[in-house]
Amino acid sequence: MRRTTKLGRGTIRFVNGLVNLFVLTVVLSLLAFGGYAIWDSGQVHAAASSVQYERYNPTIESEGGPSFADLQAINPDVFAWLTVYGTNIDYPMVQGQDNIRYVNTDARGRHSLSGAIFLDFRSGPNFSDFSSIVYGHHMENRVMFGEIALFSERSYFEARRYGMLYFDGREHGLEFFAFVHADAYDMSVFRNGITEPEDRQAYLDMLLQTAIHTRPDISVTTDDRIVLLSTCAPNSTNGRDILIGRITAETRDNPFLTEEVHTQQAVPVIDGLTNLWTEAALWMKISIAALAAWLISAAIILIYTKRKRSRTGKEMRNHE
């Protein structure tokens, strides 16, 4: 009878231990995955920060450091540099053989969820077309084209009038004259190869009529070259926010240089281990997190069981 009772109690304790282990594993797995998600998101945003590319900026003189030419040697698709004054948009620009490659490839040619700032592959090289379309991801923490949506606010648009484009070995000015919200499939907006003067004028008129904000004091003509900076709209499935500027021979000083523009944290990315983790498949990351949680759970249960057995043994000896 005593053996049966002991066996029953032992079975109950074993089952309770398994249940406790399972519950603890689930809780710790959720905590581990949540912690991983926060950490991984931070790594993605850090890797997308313009601070990562500062050393290659062709407009900044550096003695003996990496240059824009060095970045082009790493990735020959790099051909320009884009800066929007008063924002964190300060990146190298690439042009690939299609519009897919640089959605998940950075300017160094490495796999990256943040991608790169890239010129539409159908646009003429070095902004030789009347209209050139540039794409970039809308991202949080004001990285990549995450600030384009802010131009929907009139005050933000008014305060940020100029930018800079570096290509063909020299700097060119950018003067932003319109902000447009459009559908991603609206081919009347996303047009390439507009050559005839009357088609150019019709296109300009359409953009200005569609625009949320414009600058009436800027007179854009069919002889100008314009650039459309396009990104996903945060509150619309197929929406696109587009900041439109014209290229000018005259460059302007950046009036925001005396201010702290970079609001995102310049978290350094360790090229080796960090990249291996970032490029790992999601199922592998989840498996590693779950395994870590299980090992922690098992260790906690083992420690708890040993302590409980120790207390039980002491109580039995004291009772005897």
Image (tube, rainbow, N blue to C red):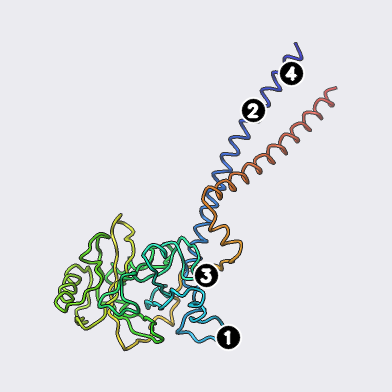
- Image quadrant where one finds the N terminus: top right
- Image quadrant where one finds the C terminus: top right
The numbered dot on residue 76 is none
- Label 3: how many residues lie within 10 Å, few (<14), some (14-19) or many (20+)? some
Give the distance between the C-alpha atoms of the residues marked 2 and 4, in whole angstroms: 15 Å
Q: Circle 1 is placed at which residue position?
A: 64
Helix, strand or loop at label 2? It is helix
Helix, strand or loop at label 4? It is helix
Marks 1 and 2, the one that precedes in the sequence: 2
The reply to whether dot 1 and dot 3 touch (C-beta < 8 Å) is no
Residue occupying the point 56% across, 50% down: 285
**Eye-nearest disc, 4 or 1:** 1
Marks 1 and 3, the one that precedes in the sequence: 1
Marks 3 and 2, the one that precedes in the sequence: 2
**Eye-nearest disc, 1 or 2:** 1
The numbered dot on residue 6 is 4
For the residue marked with disc 3, what is the amino acid? Ala
How far from the left and from the top, in percent, is residue 137?
39, 64
Q: Circle 3 is placed at which residue position?
A: 266
How far from the left and from the top, in percent, is residue 258?
44, 82
Marks 4 and 1, the one that precedes in the sequence: 4
Marks 3 and 4, the one that precedes in the sequence: 4
